[in-house]
Each structure stands twice: as C-alpha cells, then as structure tokens.
Image: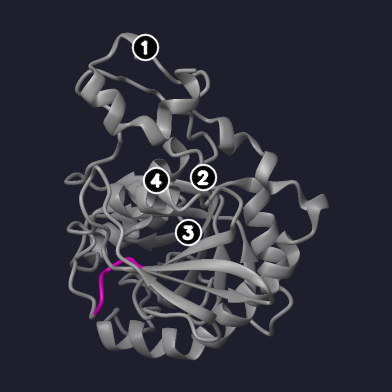
Amino acid sequence: MAGEFAFGIIGGSGLYSLDGFENMETLEVETPFGKPSSPIVTGTIHGKKLAFLARHGIGHIYTPTEVNYRANIHAMKQLGIDKIISVSAVGSLREDYAPGDIIVPDQLFDFTKDRKRTFFGDGIVAHVSTADPFCPDLSQSLLQALRKTDATVHEGGIFVTIEGPRFSTRAESNTFRNLGFSLVGMTASPEAYLAREAEICYATMAHVTDYDSWHESEEVVTMDMVSNTLKKNLDFARQSLLHLVDILSDADRGVAACECNSALKYAFASNIAAADPNLKDKLSLLIGKYLR
C-alpha cells in the first residue's frame, strides 16, 4: 500500500473532517499501541488519495494528554503514508504573529510531562535525531501551498508544547516569550517525534487563534475565541491542502526521498536482531527493513 496516499492529515481543534473528498471510505484501524483517536477517513482530491484522522476523536472527546499519539501515527504508517500534515490551533507569543495568521514552524520545544514519547523501550532502544523536528522539505511545500491562498502566512518559529488542557498562566506565557518561543500549543509533542521514529515526513500548519495570556491590550484566550478564529480559517486550510496535493504530485519536489524516511538507520543502541521475538513482531512495521 506504500505510495498509495499523497499524504495524511491530522486535524486538531476545529478541524474534524475534510470537505471535498471523493470516493470516501471510513477505516477502523487497530494498532499494536491500541486504537487511534478516530476512524481514518480516506478519499481522493484531484485524483490523489488522502487520509484524515481527527486527533481529539469524533466529538472532541480526548484531552491533549489523553490522545493516543502512538496509535495515531502507527495507524498512518500502516496505511503506507509517508507524509503527514498536522493542523493545529496555537496561541501566539509574538506581536507580529496575529490571530488569524497561519504559521509553518521550524522548531519545537517539549514542555509536556505525562505522555508516551516513543515507540521503543522494553528491550529495543532507539535514539532518533530530532534536531530539526519538522520535515524541512514538506514544510517548504506546505508554505508554497499556503501562499497560494489569501491567508497571512509566516515561515518559521519555535513551537512550545504545554501539557494542557488548561491554557497558560500569565507568568508561563511571559516566560515562554522571554525564552524566545513563538507559538504555544498542546499537541505537537510527541506527535512530531513519533512521526520521525516512524520515518514519516511531518509538517505543521499552525493557526493562530489568540495571544495566549501575555498581551495586555487583548483578551485572554478562551475556547470560544479559539473556535471562532478557526472557523474563519478553515477555508484557508482546505484550499492549501488542495494546492499541496498538486505540489506534491510534482516528482521534482523530492520529499519522499528526504532524510526523514531513513531516520532509524543509525538510531539503534540495541542489537535489534537479538531482541525478544514478540517485541520485534510488535515493532515490525517500524524496524522490519533493518532486520533484513
């Protein structure tokens, strides 16, 4: 099934489905790490097949900590998907990244503490490189697609992931600003790291919904504020994903051959061939090519 999909989409707050799919099918996927947050909806756009997963479940029933990130990423891998676009709601920590703007960040800081961050352990240890946690090639393609819309788009920035589900205190928000962070959200970590372990290219379309709680002349963030801004931005998200289908159809883009797709090659500290057979079976989708 590898190569069948142009890319997968993981939708966050406000994006629970994707309009415009043809030949739609709903797949119930089981993984060695449990069930993903929602069934995966597949369909075609411009003749190319896509897959969509609602990160917080149907009806937004999972907190950011409760999301089964490992199952979500593994389910995408099981479908043969090698590129994922994350659509996320974020708060801005910069004056120039205003509500309604869309950012494609290039760095990530993990401020969470209660999440499963790796597929590995229990006998197989892998230290994957996440120096550049978002795929540079896929991020550039996403930027190109976004710039074909009328959205205000910014390139780059540090995305700090907090545990949630609460929003930041003013002290936290101002500390993040003092550290030079650009955006604050609740789901990029460990999603980006797991995608790298799964050797999947991963990029984020971050929709700024508010100024978190640091901005003295703006209201502090509320869920209504997040929802209302996202509703206005969803057309930009959908338009850009349509453009991205066409951009990635160009063989010259070369995204499929980037370093993300061999991220585990030099990552193993363990002798994986000597590992417990049951563990090797559980991780076979991820490590199988390195056992041959």
Q: Amino acid at mark 2?
A: Ile
Instruction: Classify mark 2: helix, strand or loop.
Output: loop
Query: Marks 1 and 3: CB-CB under 8 Å?
Result: no
Earlier sequence position, callout 3 versus callout 4: 4
Distance of mark 4 from mark 2, alpha carbons? 19 Å
Earlier sequence position, callout 4 versus callout 2: 4
Distance of mark 3 from mark 2, alpha carbons? 25 Å
Region rendered in magenta: 54-58
Determine whether, in the image, residue 10 is placed left or right of residue 58.
right
Q: Is residue 152 visible?
A: no
In the image, is residue 43 above or below residue 248?
below
Determine whether, in the image, residue 179 is placed left or right of residue 136.
left
Q: Amino acid at mark 3?
A: Ser
Earlier sequence position, callout 1 versus callout 3: 3
Residue annotated with mark 4:
109
Q: Residue at the spot x=69%, y=59% of the render? A: 141
Residue 215 position, x and y percent, is: 38, 74
Instruction: Classify mark 3: helix, strand or loop.
Output: loop
Residue 251 position, x and y percent, is: 80, 53
Quadrant assignment, res 93? bottom left
Residue annotated with mark 2:
200
Instruction: Classify mark 4: helix, strand or loop.
Output: strand
Count of numbered marks: 4
Q: Residue at the spot x=29%, y=51% of the render? A: 71
